[in-house]
Amino acid sequence: MPAQAKPTINVGTDLIPNDLNDITEDVILTGTVADETRIRIPAGNTLNITFSNLSITDVGNFNAAFEIQSGATVHLTLEDNNTLISGEGRGGLEVLTGAFLFIEGEGELTATGGDYGSGIGGGNTGSGGTITIYGGTIWAAGSGGGSGIGGGINGSGGTTTIYGGEIIAKAGNNNAAAIGAGQDNSTHGSTTVHGTHWTWTHNTGNSTAGATTGNGEFTNIPASYRYIQLVDTREQITWTELTANGESKTTNTTELTLTFSAEPTGLTADNIKVMNATKGALTALTSTTYTLAISDIKVSNGKNVTVRITSPADINITPPSRKVQVWNTAPPRKVNINVSGGSLIIGKP
């Protein structure tokens, strides 16, 4: 059974205009606004958000187009072209210390900080949160002392981990890092780029003039880099759907169906992990559709299991994980109970 479809919110028609709007449910965000309409994910929420042709700009000074508060987590899927531009002192896509952002998908995102803010991360004096990128084409530009990804001016870098996608990070000036801390802060945090599947361009100035290029493994991103572009050379494949067989109170789930946008060459059961169930054989029905046998489901009837895929060599599957509702109705059992020397049978014999 597939996950329930997320509702769609058009920011131009469905939000309170010229105001801060809190989002507390999984949604698809689309539409265009160029006023002080903006979005916040409050602390305590863990949400799956999709940007699909979303544009939030001209939000006014000291306002963030899209803010993830400390204590909140967003799993962000990118579709089509998306733009966030914040006002003075704020991050373009603001991810505060203690906030978590995971980015995936095949779409594009341009995130531009206001003066003193990062492209993705902290605003003025704000440190970056925890940012993990699996896919998408991302342009993150700081302004006036803000990093591309990480801290705003005077802010530390936070934690950035990159597995795939195309990422361009540009500092707001030559005193901030492309990925790391903002101007006047020497705590650049942690930046990790996984794999050997990259072509890259980097520069100690915040432009491409005189930049250095190369390919292969790229794990070291010094704080002296003001501009960096990383391009994943693997084939990008979208995991489009995960469904489960079975029916509540009737039939237990024994099989999951995985569907991809293109053939996931090299995918085997060894690349797949199922939480709270035991996986079995992986079978290809077509070049893009596979079934996976499962058993010994440990979650309650109607709850979700999580399936994670580690991409085979030469391809990048996003998102790397999905959840699906499964059915686990225990059959009736025979129980013998001694009653005054006799026997009482409960259940079908």
Image: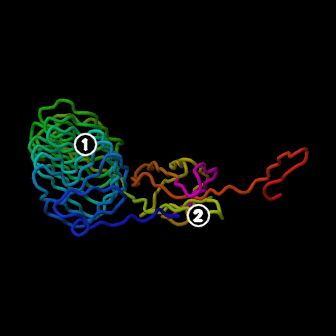
Report the amino acid beneath label 1.
Leu
Residue 212 in view: no
Where is the C terminus found, in terms of image quarters? bottom right
Magenta residues span 289-304
Q: Are the residues flagged by discs 2 and 1 in contact, CB closer than 8 Å? A: no
Please identify, in this view, whether the residue under mark 2 or under mark 1 is nearer the observer. 1
Report the amino acid beneath label 2.
Asn
Residue 261 in view: yes
Q: Give SS at disc 1.
A: loop
Q: Which mark is residue 40?
A: none
Image position of 209 (left or right of 102) = left
Gap in Å between the C-alphas at discs 2 and 1? 40 Å
Q: Residue at x 21, y 38 (%)?
A: 127
Q: Give SS at disc 2.
A: loop
The quadrant in which residue 10 appears is bottom left
The percent position of residue 43, horizontal first and vertical second, equals 31, 46
**Residue furthest out toward the front:** 340
> Is residue 91 highlighted in magenta?
no
The percent position of residue 216, horizontal first and vertical second, equals 31, 43
Q: Residue at x 19, y 39 (%)?
A: 126
The percent position of residue 284, horizontal first and vertical second, equals 55, 62
Q: Residues within 10 Å of mark 2 (few under 14, many from 20)?
A: some
Q: What residue does disc 2 label?
A: 245
Q: What residue does disc 1 label?
A: 96
Q: Residue at x 14, y 59 (%)?
A: 36
Image position of 91 (left or right of 280) = left
Nearer-the-camera pick, 94 or 160: 94
Q: Residue at x 22, y 36 (%)?
A: 157
The quadrant in which residue 255 appears is bottom right
**Residue furthest out toward the top:** 186
